Amino acid sequence: MKYRVERTDTADSFIRKIVLFIAESFGNDVALEKLDYLEKSIMNLGDNPYVGVEPRYNVLKRQGYLVLILEKDLVFYKVDDDKKVVTVYAVVDQRQEYLSIIRGL
């Protein structure tokens, strides 16, 4: 059964920051390609919500997060099997120290 995919305002904000940075650095065409890639990858979670892996930090594992690894980005999300919902909480560059970012959610 297909899951509904929801994104928090925080996740949308992180996606905007990534796309704006790419637009400033590499141009609008590259930024639009990145946005399309992120959108499609996130929406695919509706068909396969357990494609992600457990995070390496125990504190995030205990909170039930899964991580979808996309090239240089990490998508942090949770799956609610009862409601058939995947909620995306954050999208961060994996080169960042993301633990403090996720703890703040």
Image (tube, helix red, strand yellow):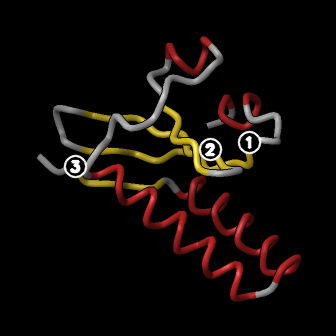
What separation in Å lies between label 2 and label 1 (alpha carbons)? 6 Å
Label drawn at residue 94: 1
The amino acid type of the residue labelled 3 equals: Tyr
Q: Earlier in the sequence, mark 2 or mark 3?
A: 3
Q: To which residue does mark 2 refer?
A: 74
Residue extending furthest toward the left: 1
> Which quadrant: the C terminus?
top right
Q: SS class of the residue under badge 1?
A: loop
Q: Nearer the viewer, mark 2 or mark 3?
A: 2
Look at the numbered disc 3 and give the secondary structure of its residue.
Answer: loop
Find out whether the residues at labels 2 and 1 contact each other: C-beta distance under 8 Å: yes
* Position of 53 relative to 39 (above/below): above
Nearest to the observer: residue 103 or residue 19: 19
Kind of residue sitting beneath label 2? Leu
Residue 83 in percent (x, y) is at: 18, 39
Report the residue at 78% width, 80% height from top: 23
Q: How busy is the neighbourhood of tag 1: few (under 14 within 10 Å), some, or many (20 plus)? A: some
Task: Tell me the residue at 41%/35% (across/down).
Answer: 78
Q: Earlier in the sequence, mark 1 or mark 3?
A: 3
- What residue is at 65 percent from the left and 17 percent from the top? 57
Q: Residues within 10 Å of mark 2 (few under 14, many from 20)?
A: many
Q: CA distance from mark 2 to mark 3?
A: 20 Å
What residue is shown at x 59% (from left), y 50% (from top)? 70
Measured Cα–Cα span from mark 1 to mark 3: 26 Å
Q: What amino acid is labelled 1 in the image? A: Gln
Against 62, residue 55 (above or below) is below
Mark 2 residue element: strand
Asked if the residues shown at circle 1 and circle 3 are in contact, with their CB atoms under 8 angstroms apart, the answer is no
Report the residue marked by disc 3. 3
Return the disc, 2 or 1, that comes first in the chain's sequence.
2
